Amino acid sequence: MTYCVGLMLDKGLVFMSDTRTNSGVDNISTFRKMFSFNVEGERDITLMTAGNLATTQALISLLEERSKYHSERDPDILTVPTMFQVARLVGETLREVIGEHANTGQRADAAFNATVILGGQIKGGKPCLFMIYPEGNFIEASEDTPFFQIGETKYGRPILLRAYDAAMEFDEAVKLLLVSFDSTIKANLSVSLPLDVKTYAEGKFSPHQQLRVEPDDNYFQQISQGWGVALRTAFQELPDFKF
Amino acid sequence: MTYCVGLMLDKGLVFMSDTRTNSGVDNISTFRKMFSFNVEGERDITLMTAGNLATTQALISLLEERSKYHSERDPDILTVPTMFQVARLVGETLREVIGEHANTGQRADAAFNATVILGGQIKGGKPCLFMIYPEGNFIEASEDTPFFQIGETKYGRPILLRAYDAAMEFDEAVKLLLVSFDSTIKANLSVSLPLDVKTYAEGKFSPHQQLRVEPDDNYFQQISQGWGVALRTAFQELPDFKF
């Protein structure tokens, strides 16, 4: 499994992804699931992937490769003019990768499917956040639904629903995501540290802040232990039930 | 979907179940999913069901019918001597019901499967809690895993993991379950009020307390709103993150 969240704030975008991949509980590895495409001062694009690892790696490699040979392959992720076009390009490339393996007589127990969260900004447009499906189609975040989750989405959702606020500072949003990831990691072995974190500030056209949270990270330990205590205290302070 | 939880406490057992059933979002109904079998002063048994409604209703009807004709059908749920035997009986009956429909040339989009939480006490034994699978086999709760959830289990699990304590009073446990149900109801349309609640006190051999929480229940509204506020406060009180 996987857990990735993309948040849209008034100030910009926040991304967090775990790094655990597995094919069965007896075969786990660590792989990066967050990728950046950047043209300094012009565009900053972030992708996070969930699903079949061979598919998501092929997707990222194709996007990278094609962005290096503009003359042969145009448009590419570094030249298309809008975030909507980026989403279409990523969707088409994803469908192409899945299609290559799905219809060659090969069969696998696990599907070749993958899902992508895409966010960023290109000069002339606003910051955008998309969720792209294996079929290549996609949806865009809005004020009503200002965040997307992929992978193991359920354990970490209640706190996002309750504590998200579009006016949050980046630091506060990262704290919120760490709490959401902590609840997920506690409940599902297939989601785990290290975590990749990235923030994007509107109008900056380059990454604002980036960080990898390692398993022995002191702050994460504080959040993880503190949240258990805080939840119990919050629970105790609710009005008592009487039959 | 469905959400049911059975908790084992030092003092006894607590059960809570929702009542929403659906076949598609355009076809929802309200059905009881919690059932009691009682011989005053000798045994008190509670069943909660998730899965195909025709299967779970047939299961309960068969168990009830067979308990009325001891002479023809023995043993039955009101006469077997231990909770372990009750679990076997329920498991066998469940497998029988599913088998009847699964192998008659009939096919349905949804499987005929169902899962059951079974708890209670029979004179001479301790209170027990079981989870019974569609195949008829089952597992028993222990100190290490003192509660079972069936149906939509994920949204409401983090708070159970953090705030459960075997030494809890019944009232406190009901409050905990209401918080867990509230998180689930907020995130999944196919889980909904009214909720059925039952507590069983060790050695009582009859229901301790029973209650139906209606959608306009004043206390549930307080919990639902209060928990959002409490979560946000708890979140704010965690140490701040700094890049």
Image: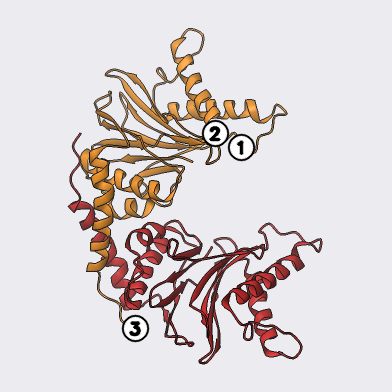
Chain colours: A red, B orange
Residue B55 location in percent, x, y? Answer: 55, 28
Q: Amino acid at mark 3?
A: Phe
The chain carrying label 1 is B
Q: Which residue is mark 1?
A: B111
Q: Are marks 1 and 2 on the same chain?
A: yes
In contact (CB < 8 Å): disc 1 and disc 2: yes
The quadrant holding residue A85 is: bottom right
Q: Amino acid at mark 2?
A: Asn
The chain carrying label 2 is B
Of residues B234 and B50, the one nearer the viewer is B234
For numbered disc 3, what is the local secondary structure? loop
Circle nearer the N terminus (1, 2): 2
Q: Residues within 10 Å of mark 2 (few under 14, many from 20)?
A: some
Circle nearer the N terminus (2, 3): 2
| Image quarter hosting the C terminus of chain B | bottom left
For numbered disc 1, what is the local secondary structure? loop
**C-alpha gap between disc 1 and disc 2:** 7 Å
The residue at the far right in this view is A105
